[in-house]
Amino acid sequence: MAAVAGAAIVTAGAFTTVPGLLVTPLHQEYGWERGQIALAASVNMVLFGLTAPFAAALMDRIGARRVVMGALLLVASGALLTGVMTRPWQLVAYWGVLIGLGSGCLTMTFAAGLTARWFDRRRSLVTGALSSASHLGQLLFLPLLARSVDHHGWRPPVVTLALVALAVAALVFLLLRDHPAEAGVKPYGATEFVPKPPPAAGAAVRTLKVLLRAARTGPFWLLAGVFALCGASTNGIMWSNWAPAAHDHGMRATAAASLLSLIGIFSALGALPAGWLTDRFDPRRVLTVCFAVRALTLLALPLVFTSTITVPMLLFVTVYGLVDVATVPPVIELARRVYGEDGPVVFGWTNAAHQLGAGASAFLGATARDAFGSYDVVWAALAAGCLVAALLAPAVRMRGHTCRPGASGRGYPSQS
């Protein structure tokens, strides 16, 4: 079950970085502005974040197998339609809406639900492995896709990804089960057989109620603001604008994709010590350090960006990558400490803010490149945003975390 879930998450992860490879080819073939092309990536990221909380509720209602299959069919359809588009709005509709909705169902909410049902022991190990699966999608596909774009144009790799999604959808249909009881087995490590629970009703309503309660508190807006700045300074700018920024400096697409893959490797590595540090120190301090280091790397990027892969560039990739996903464990822990059992749902909405920030960064970054002729002002602005996030993190109050799910807003802290 973990392997099948990982295959689905890997496939979704591969789709997230492709828009960056399409910016320059589409600009050259159709004459579309970079901002028009980046708008599709922006819509994709926003829907990716907003879909996740409701996808989790839908999985509780009709089962993960149906939702995952539907999600993979959506991303495959969006990719195939992208191959025959002729207008910018079609790119937004196909890559932004269809693939955004589909990939939004294949996030950590899916991984968390699967591990909770299928694993009694080693749950955190499996969750950690699945959380790295999205980055694995970048590592496996991105350099190959970039090489294909260089030699065969942008359409063949897009169609290839669609076929991969269809193949994984077939794998999900054949192998994935919603609960161990369907296969007649116990959860891994469990001593007793666990019957399958009835379909959950009202999960989506509770998701909205938690949002409304949390939105009346200061810590929620601090966490959402910090995580929005996180999304803007990581996947928002990198997934859709890294390749065209490298192209501006004369770097080949294959080399740029290799560097982005290395960032993915160090991101996966950085999440482990970040979790260890969060268990032992104030998570607010961990967040502050991560954002401060990220700000310094973004300020240094224009100074080390060249047409070739140099030692300073590799140093940037290493340090930036290590603090890329390192912000996730402390934000999850802060949500738990402040909102108790509602913490996971609150984190889901905080992650939606992350994707809103990412979507804004993808669009505004490309628009700024069109307006100023380079990305230098973008790196400086994002570095300033990271410094703001570093200052906001210590302001989150970690009180009121004993509130019950469904309790009134009085159980939450009322201000930051």
Image: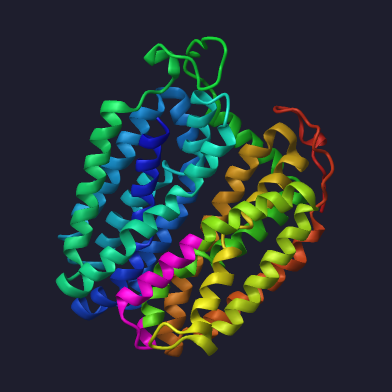
Dominant SS in magenta? helix
**Quarter in which the C terminus is drawn:** bottom right
Would you say residue 85 is visible in this rendering? Answer: no
Q: Nearer the viewer, residue 21 or 324?
A: 324
Q: Is residue 189 above or below residue 5?
A: above
Residue at (60% x, 30% y) in the render: 206
Q: Is residue 261 shown in magenta?
A: yes
Asked whether, in this view, residue 147 is left or right of residue 372, the answer is left
Q: Nearer the viewer, residue 274 or 74?
A: 274
Asked whether, in this view, residue 291 is left or right of residue 260, the answer is right
How far from the left and from the top, in percent, is residue 2?
A: 42, 34
How far from the left and from the top, in percent, is residue 52?
A: 48, 42
How far from the left and from the top, in percent, is residue 93?
A: 29, 56
Asked whether, in this view, residue 71 is left or right of residue 218, the answer is left
Q: Nearer the viewer, residue 366 or 253?
A: 253
Q: Is residue 279 above or below residue 18?
A: above
Q: Is residue 92 shown in magenta?
A: no
Q: Is residue 178 above or below residue 146?
A: above
Residue at (48% x, 66% y) in the render: 263
Residue at (69% x, 54% y) in the render: 223
Would you say residue 353 is visible in this rendering? Answer: yes
Q: Quadrant of residue 308?
A: bottom left
Asked whether, in this view, residue 129 is left or right of residue 390, the answer is left
How far from the left and from the top, in percent, is residue 261?
A: 41, 65
**Quarter in which the N terminus is drawn:** top left
**Residue bounds of the magenta highlight:** 247-265
Identify the colour scheme used. Answer: rainbow
Q: Is residue 115 above or below residue 296?
A: above
Residue at (30% x, 32% y) in the render: 172
What count of labels does the image hold?
0
